[in-house]
Amino acid sequence: EVQLVESGGGLVQAGGSLRLSCATSGFTFDDHSIGWFRQAPGKEREGVSCVSSDGSAHYADSVKGRFTISKDNAENTVYLQMDSLKPEDTAVYSCAASWYYSCSALNIEYNYWGQGTQVTVSS
């Protein structure tokens, strides 16, 4: 069974940091790209960051310089380090896996999704 389980969300003050984790199982981790997405109430889901099978990373303009994506192939886990958080970062953050080997664009098709973890940034 394919599983992606997010953790690490919570309530943080503006300017603070959180580290999200996406633990995966049930598929060949090394053959997939992994992306982080977020959705705030009343807004469309947006891509935040993704990492390709070769480790190359991509970021939405809104988070460049503040967020860092990384992965541990041995643990089949992807991380999203979020620094300098802003209230507008408040959203449910989900991770997803794509059959595509690379995520040269954030809007590639994703096939497996986690349930998400809530991130709330207070002002």
Image (tube, rainbow, N blue to C red):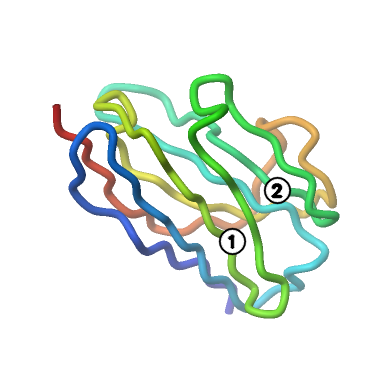
Q: Residues within 10 Å of mark 2 (few under 14, many from 20)?
A: many
Quadrant that contains the N terminus:
bottom right
Q: Residues within 10 Å of mark 1 (few under 14, many from 20)?
A: many
Disc 1 marks a residue whose amino acid type is Val
State how far apart marks 2 and 1 are (Cα): 8 Å
Q: Position of residue 30 (x, y in %)?
A: 80, 67
On screen, residue 60 above or below 48: above
Quadrant in which residue 106 is drawn: top right
Quadrant in which residue 88 is drawn: top left
Whether label 2 touches label 1, CB < 8 Å? yes
Q: Residue at x 72, y 36 (%)?
A: 108
- Residue topped by disc 1: 78
Q: Which of marks 2 and 1 is nearer the N terminus?
A: 2
Which mark identifies residue 51?
Answer: 2
Q: Residue at x 37, y 33 (%)?
A: 84
Disc 2 marks a residue whose amino acid type is Val
Quadrant in which residue 64 is drawn: top right
Q: Which residue is drawn at 57% across and 20% down?
A: 61
Quadrant that contains the C terminus:
top left
Q: Residue at x 49, y 29 (%)?
A: 46
Tag 1, which secondary structure? strand
